[in-house]
Every structure is written in structure tokens, then in C-alpha cells.
Amino acid sequence: MAFSIESILNCRTARKQAVCTVAAFCLCMAVAAPPAAQAQDAVLQHFVGEIFATAASYCPKGTEEAVGQQKSKEHELILHSVYQARYGDEGNTFGLPDLRGPFQRQGIVVGETRWCVAFEGVYSQRNGFDEGLGANGELMAFGASGGWCPGGYQLQTDPTLPHRETVSWCKYEHWSEPEDYLAQMLLIAGDSCPRYAVPADGKLLQIEENTSLFSLLGASYGGDGQTTFSLPNPSSPSQGTRWCIVTSGYFPAR
């Protein structure tokens, strides 16, 4: 079945209303239903075209690792309407950014990371208004052609931000309670991480106390892999920012 951009935009209000209804129900059931049990819903948190880092060994369902591949314009109609030819155009296909590369700290490789492109989720229009999907002070990478940010986000020009020559960085400066993937890496402008995340500072954790997080990270960032494992410990890319890792979030479905 084929969908046009217009048909998807027309159903967006009804879809958001349904999501709000589900969100209200989930709030009441928060104690009985942990985030990991709702992994299939987590993809709704991202904007189409948003790019985020994860310390997990794979990108979640509804996203794809950004390695410079070509995608079908026909099959990825909405994502193409956001990216257009920013990362290349080959007639019937368009490109995704290539963001491969390791996390580093003071020039030393401290582990691999994956940058994931969201091709399902909330469609954002240029100059429109969007309800924020990030934490206050969170910096979001976005791949829109022309370098614009979703409504409610401010475009950042700091040249030291990761992959600044390839993606646009957008800062959210309003209060919200987003829900992110377990092991997702958040770049925060400020000194503190959101309540559902901790600093990505290389801390050594006990596997038996963090089995879900360990299943995603393994011993990639340190630890013996038997009783302990470590969190990533990348350098802060620019002054006044820090990396945080989500330790209480949705388990990413494959």
C-alpha cells in the first residue's frame, strides 16, 4: 500500500490523540508496566530524520545505522522529503549520512558507537511547531536539507559538536518528560543528566544489577564481562556539554 505525504500529515492529529490516550493509560500503569515491556512503542519518540547515538550493539527497530547507504525514494518517501539530496541523490535513491567512527577520549579510542537514523516517528515541517521530544538542554542531531530544526528547537552553531560538518545540531530548551531507549547516548548542554540517565563516565557496574543494560553493551567499554562491565567514557565534544547514557528506558526492539 502506498502513502502520500499529505495522507500521513492528515492523520497526524488523530494519531497524536491516540498516542496521548495511550500515554495517559501508561502513566497510570507505570508501576505495573516497566519501560522494557513497551519497546515496540519507543519509535514514536523520534522525529523522522533525527539521528541519535547508541552504545548498544545495534540500532533499534524503526531506525537504521548511518553508514552512507542509499535508500529508495519510493519506499522512504517521508525521510526523503526531510533529507532530500543533502547526502546525495542517485535518481531513484537518496543518501543517508556516513557517521561511522569510534568514541574517543583525549584522542584515545574508548569504544565503538552507532549513529541511528529514525525513518519512522513524528514528521516535522519546517517553520512548524512541534511538541518537544527531548529533555531540557538536550542536543539533537537532525539531517534536514537546508539545516533547519523542528519547532521548539534552536539551531546550534558550535563547530566542535560531533559531525558538525555533516548534521545539524538542535537544542531543546523546554521542560518535557521524554522516554528514550536503554543505552541511548544523550548529548546534554549543562552539568546534569536527565533523571533516567547517568553520566557516561566509564563507571564500572555489576552485571547482576544491570542485566538489561549489559545485554546491550557487553564488555565493549571495559569490565571483565563475567561480573562487571563499564559504561562508555567519551570526551565532551564542546565546553559546557556532557554525554549521558540512558539506564532506565525502553529496551530497543530489533
Image (tube, helix red, strand yellow):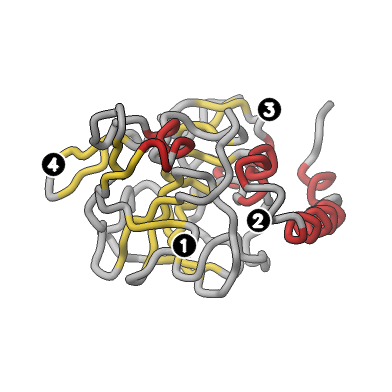
| Residue 9 rendering spot, x and y as whole percentages | 79, 51
The Cα atoms of the two marked residues, 3 and 1, are separated by 27 Å
> Amino acid under label 3?
His
Which residue is disc 3 drawn over? 75
Mark 3 or mark 1: name the one nearer the start of the chain.
3
The answer to whether residue 80 is visible is: no
- Position of the C terminus, as image quadrant, is top right
Tell me if label 3 and label 2 are in contact, CB under 8 Å. Answer: no
Mark 2 or mark 1: name the one nearer the start of the chain.
2
Tell me if label 3 and label 1 are in contact, CB under 8 Å. Answer: no
The Cα atoms of the two marked residues, 4 and 2, are separated by 37 Å
| Residue 107 rendering spot, x and y as whole percentages | 12, 45
Which residue is disc 2 drawn over? 124
Give the label, 3 or 4, closer to the camera.
Answer: 4
Picture residue at 80% right of the left edge, 45% below the top: 8
Tell me if label 4 and label 2 are in contact, CB under 8 Å. Answer: no
Mark 4 or mark 2: name the one nearer the start of the chain.
4
Of 94 and 253, nearer the camera is 253
